[in-house]
């Protein structure tokens, strides 16, 4: 199988055109899933991008290829501190179906985790639907561990994960 995603770069969505590209990918993500994101105020979030994902406490990243342009996105925002300290949340990971299984999602997650560490977060959290088996497998392989519910997501099959970003003391 030829890798349509090679080569790809991970870049900041730091200007209006890139934010628009991220918005389009996030909308594509929303349209690809069976659950509603209305409880997350998705439409308002899209209208206000970058919003809570703005630097310095957040970011939006794009995976881009020379031939296809933006093929994936991921975002980070600060949330209430958890037991480990200052905490961020990974949101809106999406890779176009044609570019999946080539490491794009993993590379975006690793870059986001590095950004979170560099900003000084102690932990990163995320939630995902139990049915998104490839995503759950990816998160576990990156060291995310199951945690109790940390938000008001109304979907009963939501799974919650956390990754410690600072070494344990002791």
Image (cartoon, rainbow, N blue to C red):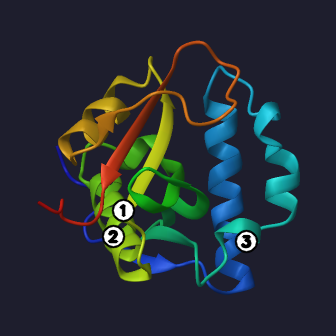
The residue singled out by tag 3 in the image is: 50
| Residue 76 place in picture, x, y as percent | 54, 63
Residue at 24% from the left image edge and 53% from the top image edge: 103
Tell me if label 2 and label 1 are in contact, CB under 8 Å.
yes
- Element at badge 2? helix
| Residue 86 place in picture, x, y as percent | 49, 65
Q: Residues within 10 Å of mark 3 (few under 14, many from 20)?
A: many
Tell me if label 3 and label 2 are in contact, CB under 8 Å.
no
The residue singled out by tag 2 in the image is: 111
Farthest front residue in view: 170
Q: In the image shown, does 48 or 99 lie closer to the viewer?
A: 48
Residue at 37% from the left image edge and 49% from the top image edge: 99
Residue at 44% from the left image edge and 80% from the top image edge: 119
| Residue 153 place in picture, x, y as percent | 67, 28
Which mark is on residue 108?
Answer: 1
Q: Residues within 10 Å of mark 1 (few under 14, many from 20)?
A: many
Per the model, the C-alpha gap separating discs 2 and 1 is 5 Å
- Element at badge 1? helix
| Residue 137 place in picture, x, y as percent | 26, 32
Q: In the image shown, does 85 or 101 lie closer to the viewer?
A: 85
Farthest left residue in view: 170
Residue at 69% from the left image edge and 73% from the top image edge: 19
Q: Residues within 10 Å of mark 2 (few under 14, many from 20)?
A: some
Residue 73 in view in this figure:
no
């Amino acid at each position: 199988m030829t890798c349509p995603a090679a080569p790809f770069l991970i870049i900041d969505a730091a200007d209006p055109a890139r934010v628009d590209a991220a918005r389009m990918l996030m909308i594509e993500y929303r349209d690809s899933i069976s659950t509603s994101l209305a409880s997350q105020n998705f439409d308002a979030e899209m209208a206000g991008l970058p919003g809570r994902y703005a630097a310095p406490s957040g970011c939006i990243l794009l995976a881009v290829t020379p031939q296809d342009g933006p093929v994936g996105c991921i975002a980070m925002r600060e949330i209430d501190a958890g037991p480990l300290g200052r905490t961020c949340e990974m949101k809106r990971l999406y890779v176009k179906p044609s570019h999946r299984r080539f490491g794009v999602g993993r590379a975006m997650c690793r870059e986001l985790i590095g950004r979170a560490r560099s900003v000084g977060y102690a932990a990163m959290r995320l939630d995902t639907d139990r049915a998104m088996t490839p995503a759950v497998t990816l998160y576990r392989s990156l060291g995310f561990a199951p945690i109790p519910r940390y938000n008001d997501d109304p979907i009963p099959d939501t799974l919650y994960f956390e990754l410690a970003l600072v070494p344990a003391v002791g």
